[in-house]
Image (tube, grey):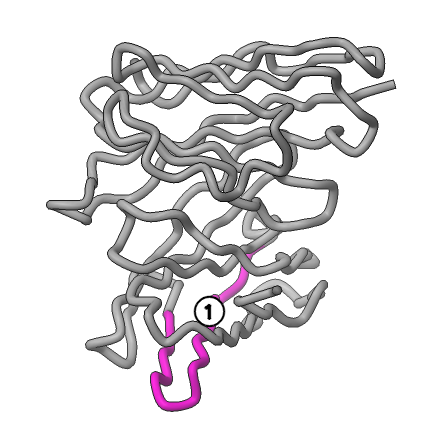
């Protein structure tokens, strides 16, 4: 595809519901990142995949957050039992770079705006 | 812990003027310093990036100045245009784009016509 795509673009969930957010990275990009962006703030790192391996999940705020990338391309961020504090824009980024060749920019998708009511 | 501090929070500049945004970092392991531009409803887009082996990088109207000893870097937008009105984020990472970016808190730039 032409860029990183994310779906849905907007999601409204009632507190306690589970949600799944999808990211389609640029074809061939090895690295995939999830970030959380609160209103008026900079993005904050959640987790990182190199191909299908989740190498860093240190930014996930709780065990209600779970991410996967089973075939090394599409990734899903799942949030269980959503809380109001989970309301934010969730951004996905992909990059050609990886540990052995750390060059190439991170390309961001448009994000999914999650509102928990 | 905020590892990248960005200022000002907002900036208003007249068309044709120079916009200057500053960032300071704490982690001396950072070796990649990009600037991102974000329009409402869009994801951040890379504007320009620098590595610590150079003190300045210029691309068109955009220039990054980097001071390794002071652990500071700044973005200068020359001849600012209304179309430059957006939110700008500085960021930093170790080992280039293959690692997570740590972002500043953002600067909302408004360029008046």
**Left or right of B54, for residue A17:** right
Q: What x and y, as percent, mark residue A21?
A: 55, 14
When asked about the image quadrant of residue A29, the answer is top left
Taking the view exactly as shown, the residue that stands out farthest to the front is A63
Q: Which residue in the protein does label 1 denote?
A: B75
Residue drawn at x 59%, y 39% as measured from the top left: B39
**Left or right of A87, for residue A111:** left
Q: Secondary structure at mark 1?
A: strand
For disc 1, the chain is B
The magenta stretch spans residue A97: no
Q: What x and y, as percent, mark residue B13?
A: 66, 67
Near mark 1 (Cα within 10 A), the count class, few <14, some 14-19 or many ≥20, is many
B88 w.r.t. A72: above or below: below
Q: What x and y, as percent, mark residue B80?
A: 53, 62
Residue drawn at x 39%, y 52% as measured from the top left: B47
The part of the chain drawn in magenta is: B64-81
| Nearer-the-camera pick, B18 or A71 | A71
| Nearer-the-camera pick, B59 or A8 | A8
Residue drawn at x 57%, y 16% as measured from the top left: A78
B77 w.r.t. A62: above or below: below
Q: What x and y, as percent, mark residue B46?
A: 39, 47
Residue drawn at x 29%, y 77% as measured from the top left: B56
């Amino acid at each position: 595809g032409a860029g990183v795509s994310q779906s849905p673009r907007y999601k409204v969930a009632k507190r306690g519901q589970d949600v799944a957010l999808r990211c389609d990275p640029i074809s061939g990009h090895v690295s995939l990142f999830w970030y959380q962006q609160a209103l008026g703030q900079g993005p904050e790192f959640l987790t990182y995949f190199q191909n299908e391996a989740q190498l860093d999940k240190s930014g996930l705020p709780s065990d209600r957050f779970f991410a996967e990338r089973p075939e090394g391309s599409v990734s899903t961020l799942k949030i269980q039992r959503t809380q109001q504090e989970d309301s934010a824009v969730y951004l996905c980024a992909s990059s050609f770079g990886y540990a052995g060749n750390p060059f190439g920019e991170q390309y961001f998708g448009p994000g999914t705006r999650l509102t928990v009511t | 812990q905020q590892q990248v501090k960005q200022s000002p929070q907002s900036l208003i500049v007249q068309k044709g003027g120079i916009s200057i945004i500053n960032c300071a970092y704490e982690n001396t392991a950072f070796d990649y310093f990009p600037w991102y531009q974000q329009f409402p409803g869009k994801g951040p887009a890379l504007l320009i990036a620098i590595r610590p082996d150079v003190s300045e990088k210029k691309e068109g109207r955009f220039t990054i100045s980097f001071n390794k000893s002071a652990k500071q870097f700044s973005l200068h937008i020359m001849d600012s245009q209304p179309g430059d009105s957006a939110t700008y984020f500085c960021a930093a990472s170790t080992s280039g784009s293959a690692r997570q970016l740590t972002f500043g808190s953002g600067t909302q730039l408004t360029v008046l016509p």
